[in-house]
Image: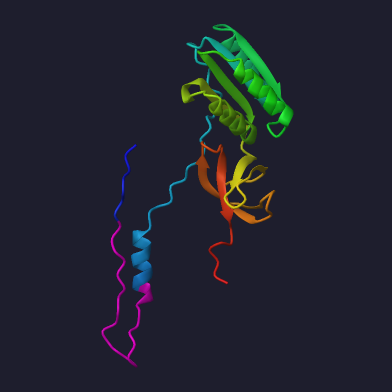
Amino acid sequence: MSLHLRMFPRVRSTLSNHKTDNTFHLDQGAMNTAVADTLPPRIPSVPHWPVTPPPPNPAAASYLIVAIGALESTARVVNQWISQAGETAPTQLLTLDSMESSTDRAALVRALDCAYTGVRILVTGGQYDVIVALTAARDHGAIACELTGFAVHTRDAPVYCAHCRNTFRAQAEPGELIMCAHCARTLEIHEHFTSALGSFLASDAHAREIV
């Protein structure tokens, strides 16, 4: 992995040429402009879900379809995948209620433990459940080409608190303020998703305030 360093121009203070009471006056407008010019742009990093369910990879040796939740939209996606995948390779369907359930997480782990080379894993449900399930699959060695996810809604998300380092389900979107379910801080959800943690990053919304 190569490291690219971006050099930013030095910020220069503009001082008035007139000396008054042995002090120099900082041109605040010029300073604000200079600082603004040197800040790198904010680049959002959030999941982009497909509009329609992607079809199963026809080259798969087998399929593991994971349906999470009881929404009708989830059932429709599953039925579509089963009709497409069942024509080409053996297909296993795993239905779960929620990835917040330790029982359901254990059931997913058992299914992943039984998977063989060539399997394609397709996951559908709400955004929180899909992300958590895909993260579990990656932790078990699945690679990107073996995984397909389709979120039927984005009303919830896994959020990682940068302070207590816990992850929890939040009914919110990037840019919104929420209370951490563990440390009770007021957090701002950032437009940054980390696949390593399988969550959106959030930090204290008031950390930059000067008291």
Q: Quadrant of the C terminus?
A: bottom right
Residue located at (33% from left, 66% from top): 34
Q: Is residue 85 above or below residue 43?
A: above
Say whether residue 175 is visible.
no
Magenta span has 27?
Answer: yes
Left or right of 59 in this view: 82: right
Residue 75 horizontal/vertical position (percent): 68, 22
Query: Which quadrant of the view contains residue 108?
Result: top right
Residue located at (52% from left, 29% from top): 50
Residue located at (69% from left, 49% from top): 182
Residue 85 horizontal/vertical position (percent): 57, 11
Q: How is the image coloured?
A: rainbow
Residue 86 horizontal/vertical position (percent): 59, 8
Say whether residue 109 is visible.
yes
Q: Is residue 122 above or below residue 167?
A: above
Q: Is residue 16 above or below residue 115?
A: below
Q: Residue furthest left?
A: 17
Magenta span has 201?
Answer: no
- Specify start and end residues of the magenta stretch as a single range: 8-29
Residue located at (33% from left, 43% from top): 3
What secondary structure characterizes most of the magenta part?
loop
Q: Is residue 168 above or below residue 26?
A: above
Left or right of 33 in this view: 198: right
Of 165 and 21, the residue lying toward us: 165
Q: Quadrant of the N terminus?
A: top left
